[in-house]
Amino acid sequence: MTGQGFGPSFDRVVDALRQVTVEASSSGGQWTKFRCPAHEDSSPSLGVKYDPRREKTIVNCFAGCPQEDVLGAAHIRVRDLFDHLPERTGNGHRAERQRRPAAVSNPVRRPRPQQPSRDLGAVTGQRRRVATYTYTTAANEPVGQVVRTATPHEHGIEKGFYQRRWDASDRTWVSGGFKPVLYQAPIVAWAIEQGHPILVCEGEKDVDRAIAAGYPATCNAGGAGKFGPEHAEQLRGARHVVIVADRDGPGFDHAISVHDRVQGIGGRVEVMQAATGKDLSDHFDAGHNINELTRIPADQLALYREGPAGRGTGPRQVPAATVPRRPNVARPQMDWGLDR
């Protein structure tokens, strides 16, 4: 379909399909081909093409899946298939929209994803959704989702994330970001009310792991560097906030940012890291319990902020003589309450 004009509905539909399935390496005539997300599709059987006369995008599964099943699997609304919804007449019926002259130049197409920066080699399988993390308000009303994907390559797995938000008017999920709410907000609100300590992790996987072990935990969508004042305000009144820093430069930067935003809106605030491995999941996988997290003292945080090498290298920036070694660090006494 190269060289032909595409309306906004085509880019919208193709982008949504790329979030949930794999696009074929070659097109089938007028059709852009995908593996159909509505059934187990070993070869691309879903076709997408643009009809410029009707200013709409056509989606068809040649294996026979109903269109509503395909659209539902890709979180596409029927209205998304049209460049413009027909205008209503005075009697309530939709009128045919007046055709506009064709544009001289083609609309800009969104480029296909580039090869990962690290050398994973060629893609060897279909991208699949491995986890969906739902964000809600403290009253458990849906707000958004973070979807985690995995794409197999010759030399490893490429991890990916995308977001979608809850459209309350249509009661469906649509592509795009959502307002800043903390993950597992009902548990956060409960922990503040009960006076329990709250873990702040970098990602949803660690949060769910902590909660499964019995410890209130949360994070923000988007990972490191995305914790804003709106997130901090939702921790107001917390008796004890424990920020678990990932053991790398961005993780330590993120932990300090969270520490500084939360400081002063509640009680005690500390930064800790895994005794073994990079993050809290590694810590638990190594057999450690919650009281074996390694505390990073306030003077080490200050040294990191003032270090001549600048931000971004994590705890390694601190002079070696001042870095506490695990055997010499007293384990923090955390009364989590839920252990009893």
Image (cartoon, rainbow, N blue to C red):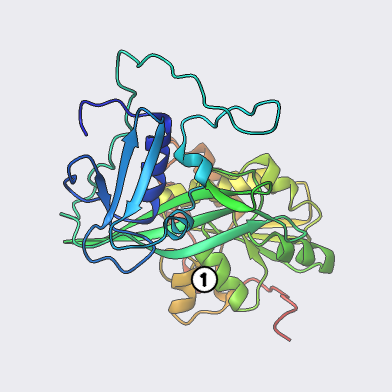
Q: What element carries label 1?
A: helix
Which residue is at the far right?
A: 193
Other residues around mark 1 within 10 Å, as few (<14) / some (14–19) / many (≥20)? few
Report whether residue 170 is seen: yes
Left or right placement of residue 181 versus residue 267 in this view: left
What amino acid is found at the position of numbered circle 1 in the picture? Asn
**Whole-percent x, y for residue 232 in the image:** 70, 47
Is 112 or 307 nearer to us in this picture? Answer: 112
Q: In this view, does 281 lie above or below 178?
A: below
**Whole-percent x, y for residue 65 in the image:** 37, 62
Left or right placement of residue 31 versus residue 161 in this view: left
Q: Quadrant of residue 44?
A: bottom left
Which residue is at the far front?
A: 91
Q: Where, quadrant-wise, is the N terminus in this rendering?
A: top left
Is 202 or 239 nearer to us in this picture? Answer: 202
**Whole-percent x, y for residue 336 in the image:** 71, 75
Left or right placement of residue 317 versus residue 297 in this view: left
Q: Number of marks in the image?
A: 1
Q: In this view, does 287 lie above or below 94?
A: below
Which residue is at the far bottom?
A: 340
Q: Where, quadrant-wise, is the C terminus in this rendering?
A: bottom right
Residue shown at 83% from the left, 69% from the top = 194
Residue shown at 41% from the left, 60% from the top = 66
Report whether residue 318 is seen: no
**Whole-percent x, y for residue 101 in the image:** 38, 14
Which residue is tagged 1? 328
Residue shown at 84% from the left, 64% from the top = 193
